[in-house]
Amino acid sequence: DAGITQSPRHKVTETGTPVTLRCHQTENHRYMYWYRQDPGHGLRLIHYSYGVKDTDKGEVSDGYSVSRSKTEDFLLTLESATSSQTSVYFCAISDPGLNYGYTFGSGTRLTVV
Amino acid sequence: DAKTTQPTSMDCAEGRAANLPCNHSTISGNEYVYWYRQIHSQGPQYIIHGLKNNETNEMASLIITEDRKSSTLILPHATLRDTAVYYCIVRVAESGANSKLTFGKGITLSVRP
């Protein structure tokens, strides 16, 4: 979708282990976002970035960190995964061609056991 | 960003037009109306957006009332693949920190054969 890919697509990990999810874009857009989606809660913003090394927290940032060392890559890290972080994670970019509407990746389904 | 109100669900027959309403009575003059949809297990997909004029693209038409307090997304010939959750979102068209895309619960459209 519009040059945005997420990896891995699926992951199962154990409680307490670190996990890193990757979002890669080929569009050279400045703004990137990480959301999680859970039944009954809809899409909730975790962190976002407005440029290399510029990031900020969203509404559900506890337990997550992010890094953006290159324009094209936005990494989401769960320092010590917990079962409450079992979710589907979506990355998005803000597209000037859509009047800054978002283009989303296909998602990463993470299960913490 | 202005809040939106959508019905919880609706259905329509395959091949007929699906008209999805959205109320945004507190919309500001510089806020756009965006529509997204999410098909089960996939990332949200951009459909269309508009400021005050009606808009049409290959996916849908967007009708915005003259006072801009409500809008309707029209899928002219609904197919089974249009079954999804549709989100109406109002926000300013910029990529700054204050224009994050906030998703509500959306409306579930079920297209029946």
Image (tube, coloured by chain):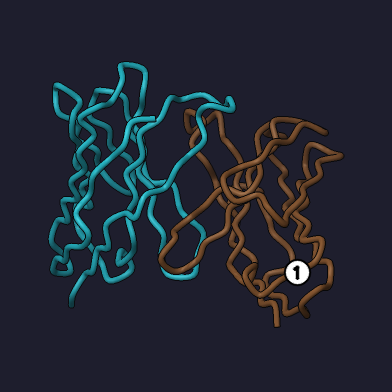
Residue situated in front as seen by the camera: B77 or B25: B25
Left or right, A96 with respect to B26, comes to right
Residue sticking out furthest to the top: B29
Residue A109 in sight from this viewpoint: no
Q: Which chain is brown?
A: A
Which residue is rendered at x = 35% and y = 28% of the image? B32
**Chain B, colour shown:** cyan
Residue sticking out furthest to the bottom: A113
Q: Quadrant of residue A15?
A: bottom right
The C terminus of chain A lies in quadrant: bottom right
Q: Quadrant of residue A110?
A: bottom right
The x, y position of residue B6, in whole percent, is: 22, 49
Left or right, B80 with respect to A8, comes to left
Residue situated in front as seen by the camera: B8 or A99: B8
Q: Describe the element under mark 1 as helix, strand or loop.
A: loop
Q: Chain of mark 1?
A: A
Residue A63 in sight from this viewpoint: yes
Instruction: Give the crowd class for mark 1: few <14, some 14-19, many >=20 residues within 10 Å.
Output: many
Above or below — where is A52 with respect to B75?
A: above
The x, y position of residue B64, in whole percent, is: 20, 31
Q: Disc 1 designates what residue?
A: A81
Q: What amino acid does circle 1 point to?
A: Ala
The x, y position of residue A97, in whole percent, is: 52, 30
Left or right, A108 with respect to B63, comes to right
Q: How many marks?
A: 1
The x, y position of residue A2, in whole percent, is: 60, 47
Which residue is rendered at x = 61% and y = 61% of the image? A89
Residue situated in front as seen by the camera: B35 or A45: A45
Which residue is rendered at x = 55% and y = 28% of the image? A96
Residue sticking out furthest to the right: A69
Which residue is rendered at x = 34% and y = 46% of the image? B58
